[in-house]
Each structure stands twice: as C-alpha cells, then as structure tokens.
Image: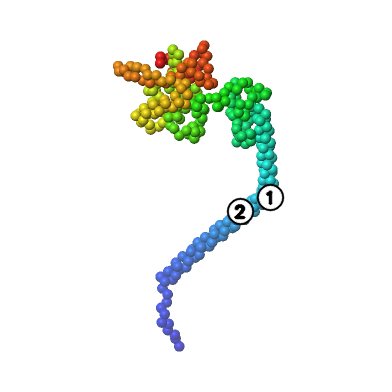
C-alpha cells in the first residue's frame, strides 16, 4: 500500500535560506561570546582595582587613627605653651609696671600699652634726644638717664603738631572737622619729607616758610578727590582758620599783591616766621632752610 504525502519537498532555495540564517546566528553567537569575554576581563580588572583601593583606604584609615592618637598630646603641649607664654607676659607686664612706677623710661617697642597696669592707667609717650620713643609715667624722670634728655612729650606739642602725628584713621576718630584734618595734613607735609605732596615754600626776610592760598587750593583738590574748585576755595579759608587756631597763632596770614598773565590780584599767604615758637623745631642760623623739606629749590619773597 503506497502512502502519498501532502507536504511539498523543500526546495533548494529554502534550504539555502535556512543555511544563511544558521550561519548568521552562529556569527551572532560568536560576537556575543567575544563581548562577554571582554566584559569578564573588564570585571576582573575592576575587581583588582577595587581591591587595591580598599587596601589603600584601609591604610589611610589606619594613618588617620594614628594621627588622631597623636593630636591630643600635641594640643595638650600647645595649651601648656600658651599658658606659659601668657604667664610670662603677665610677669613681664607686672615688672614693667613696677619699673615705670619707679620712674623708668621704657622703649615703646618693648611695651604693650594695653597690658600695662599703672597708677591711674596713664602712660606718656615721649621722644628722647637719641631719636627713640619711650613710655613713662607723666612727668617722671628716668633715674638711669638712658636715652639722653627728653625731647618733647606729646602734651608739650601744639594741637596742630599732635594731630599731624596721627595716621588717617586716628585723625578721623579725633576730629570730624575736615578743615582741621586738612590743617593737620598740611602741617605734616611741611615737616615730614616722606609725605611728598608739600605746597610750602621757603621764605626770606624773617619768614621761615609760607604757603599761598592758591597753592593750598590745588593741594586740597589733590587731597580730597571730587572737590570742586569753588568748594576748594571755601575750604582754603576754613583750613587757614584751623591752622591759626590749632597752631595757637604761631602762624600768620598776610595779603600780597601778585601779577599773573598781566593781571594784578591780592593773594593770602600763611606764614611761619623765623621767630615763631614751634616746640621741637629750632632753626639753625647757619642752615636757615633746615625745616624746609621737599620744597622747590627756588626761593620766593613772601
């Protein structure tokens, strides 16, 4: 008995298609296996790096614990040193206070003024003829006579001289008057060559130095940024008044006729005469310009 199949026999084309698909699948399997191998190698590398990192972290943690263990002794030593330094500072301050109360004059650089406890809490800063600055109790003479004679104490100076010795912050804290601050700076420019901007000029015929109102106006505008010309003129008058008051009339004001560009005008000048009593300044007759620092070399007749 013969059997007939209804399914058609596979054709050559179908067989080729199946062969191609099988080959593609084999290539895909090989690609995936290669990628898997690379990932395994990458995982092995990362695990090795992770292990090394963990070992390094463990080493750092051990180091940190060791540092923490040593930190406490160091802090304790620092605290002990600080206490010792403070105790020594207190001892030195006490000894200095005792010496000052005995009349000693101590170098300014060696004194912490805020830490010295003396009678009435008053210390006087002085300068001696050795050029050094000292502290003492007011009006006390040095029994050891170190540093030579006292040149001048702060209280001996004119108000204008006292203000001129202050820095900008102290000057503002001492006086809120702009003309007074300008007067102090103007005086400082006369006696301190390091200031640089000095409008004072050498005088003659009994005048040690002078500054004209015009030069003062330009000087004020250089000192005070943004000041207009008209306001600077007003400040000149107020600054001259402050100069006269703070110098206790050691300065004088005179008017002088001037000619400029063919025109005549009257200009005020502030004069410091040769015979003016300015504490700490003594005019050597052989060097009449000894107190004229930073001034133009030409001499003008005031």
Q: Residue furthest top?
A: 286
First-in-chain label (2 vs 1): 2
Depth check, front residue: 105 or 102: 102
Residue at disc 1, secondary structure: helix
* Number of dots carrying numbers: 2
Depth check, front residue: 195 or 266: 266
User: For the residues carrying marks 2 and 1, which lies nearer the camera in this image?
Assistant: 1
Quarter location, residue 103:
top right
Depth check, front residue: 26 or 156: 156
Q: In the image, which disc is placed on residue 53?
A: 2
- Name the residue located 60 percent from the left edge and 56 percent from the top edge: 50
Question: At which x and y percent is residue 106?
Answer: 64, 28
Question: At which x and y percent is residue 9?
Answer: 42, 77
Q: Is residue 169 left or right of residue 264?
A: right
- Name the residue located 42 percent from the left edge and 84 percent from the top edge: 4
- Name the residue located 50 percent from the left edge and 64 percent from the top edge: 29
Can you say whether 157 is above or below 4 in the image?
Answer: above
Distance from Cα at disc 2 to Cα at disc 1: 24 Å
Q: Is residue 155 left or right of residue 11?
A: right
Mark 2–mark 1 CB contact (< 8 Å): no
Can you say whether 29 is above or below 287 in the image?
Answer: below
Residue at disc 2, secondary structure: helix
Q: How is the image coloured?
A: rainbow
Q: Mark 1 sits on what residue? A: 69
Q: Residue furthest bottom?
A: 1
| Residue 91 appears in view | yes
Depth check, front residue: 133 or 179: 179
Question: At which x and y percent is residue 141?
Answer: 64, 24
Q: Residues within 10 Å of mark 1 (few under 14, many from 20)?
A: few
Question: At which x and y percent is residue 287?
Answer: 51, 13
Quarter location, residue 150:
top right
């Amino acid at each position: 008995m013969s059997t007939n199949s209804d399914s058609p026999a596979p054709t050559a084309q179908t067989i080729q298609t199946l062969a191609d698909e099988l080959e593609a699948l084999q290539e895909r399997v090989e690609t995936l296996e290669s990628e898997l191998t690379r990932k395994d190698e990458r995982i092995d590398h990362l695990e090795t790096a992770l292990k090394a990192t963990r070992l390094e972290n463990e080493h750092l943690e051990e180091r940190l614990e060791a540092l923490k263990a040593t930190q406490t002794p160091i802090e304790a030593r620092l605290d002990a040193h600080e206490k010792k330094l403070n105790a020594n500072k207190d001892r030195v301050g006490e000894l200095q206070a005792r010496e000052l109360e005995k009349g000693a004059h101590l170098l300014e650089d060696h004194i912490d003024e805020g830490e010295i406890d003396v009678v009435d809490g008053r210390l006087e800063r002085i300068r001696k003829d050795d050029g050094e600055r000292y502290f003492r109790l007011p009006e006390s003479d040095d029994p050891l006579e170190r540093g030579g004679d006292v040149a001048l104490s702060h209280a001996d100076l004119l108000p204008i001289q006292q203000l001129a010795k202050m820095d900008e912050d102290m000057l503002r804290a001492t006086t809120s008057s702009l003309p007074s601050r300008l007067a102090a700076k103007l005086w400082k420019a006369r006696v301190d060559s390091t200031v640089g901007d000095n409008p004072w000029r050498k005088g003659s015929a009994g005048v040690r130095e002078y500054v004209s109102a015009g030069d003062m106006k330009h000087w004020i505008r250089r000192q005070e940024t943004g000041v207009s010309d008209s306001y600077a003129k007003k400040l000149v008058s107020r600054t001259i008044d402050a100069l006269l008051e703070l110098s206790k009339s050691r300065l004088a004001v005179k008017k002088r006729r001037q000619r400029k560009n063919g025109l005549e005008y009257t200009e005020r000048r502030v004069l410091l005469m040769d015979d003016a009593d300015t504490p700490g300044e003594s005019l050597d007759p052989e060097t009449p310009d000894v107190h004229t620092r930073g001034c133009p070399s030409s001499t003008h007749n005031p």
